[in-house]
Amino acid sequence: MTVSRVAAIAPPRPAASWPRLITISLAALVAIGFFVNTALPYLMFDQAAIARYGPRRSGLLAHIAGGGVALLTGPLQLWLGLSRRATRTHRRLGLAYAASVAISSIAAFYLAARTTLGWVFASGITGLGIAWVLTTTMAIVAVRRGLIEQHQEWAIRSYVVTFAFVTFRLLWSVFQGAGVGTTPEQLGVASWFCWAVPLLILEVVLQGRRILGPRHVRAAALVALAVTMSAPAHAQARLTGADLNGVVRDESGSMLAGAAITVVNVETDVARSIDTGLHGRFRAVALPPGIYRIRIDREGFRRVSGRARA
């Protein structure tokens, strides 16, 4: 007879990151200012703002309404996710965010198809909509598969595309102030640069942390040590002791080969060392009954420890 135990060695909740908090807070303040001063007049049916859109005004209002919800909820959603706080609220906000992105993206495709500002502007808005859908979808797929780090990165990418509402208007204002090009040319360039360039910069930051950062920083904690212990006290257990089997995974869920497992009997202080195989699995056989400290080490990862009873 066997008994199974699962010891989940999860990474601790991240400490408050002031640079991260300041960045998200600034984004939230800018988003609120943009929504109140630029987007809200459209939603209040200001005729001076929406008159020129004629039959396309319904698509415009759907685009602004959905984008506004995503723009305003995104900073709180990011902070809750990155700090791993209020997970239930985080999930609910995530559903609202994803739904608003879907509505606004569909409206963006509609507006791009019916625009009179030329094919460059239309293709830029279409590309924005595609990037918005793909980044948000990847964030959802990653979290459903338990890939938290990837989910966080794709969520950040998604909000960078959402923030194109702000960067588009900012770029267009800069082009107008500088007197560069005609209005269709200004809008066409802004429709591409408002999301493509920020995404490129973000990608350099995300990948640069892995390439340039210290190994112990750029690697996630070893997590999810699954332990199955044979119970020696039962009739079908081997007389020589218990077996300890497990799988070592990183935070993304990938199995880690070559991790050094040290199993130490707490009472006798006798240690045994084994390594994980190709698929992150390990097995320590014939352990005397008792309590064991389990230590996991691997180059590029911080040490993780736990306990199990044999």
Image (cartoon, grey):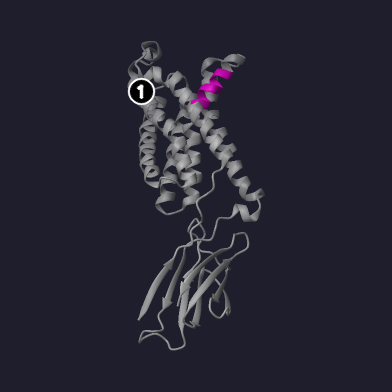
Which is more toward the observer, 17 or 220?
A: 17
Which is more toward the observer, 105 or 233?
A: 233
**Residue 70: quarter of image:** top left
- On the picture, is 107 further left or further right than 207? left
Q: Residue at x 53, y 72 (%)?
A: 293
| 169 drawn magenta | yes
| 71 drawn magenta | no
Q: Residue at x 51, y 45 (%)?
A: 153
Amino acid type, callout 1: Leu
Residue that mark 1 sits on: 61
**Residue 269: quarter of image:** bottom right
The quadrant the C terminus occupies is bottom left
Q: Residue furthest bottom?
A: 239
Q: Does residue 120 appear anywhere in the picture? A: no
Q: Which segment did they paint magenta?
A: 166-174
Q: Is residue 235 above or below residue 269?
A: below
Q: Residue at x 59, y 60 (%)?
A: 302
Residue 22 placement (x, y as % from top left): 56, 35
Residue 281 placement (x, y as % from top left): 50, 70
Q: Main secondary structure of the magenta part?
A: helix
Q: Does residue 1 appear anywhere in the picture? A: yes
Residue 242 placement (x, y as % from top left): 45, 81
The quadrant the N terminus occupies is bottom left
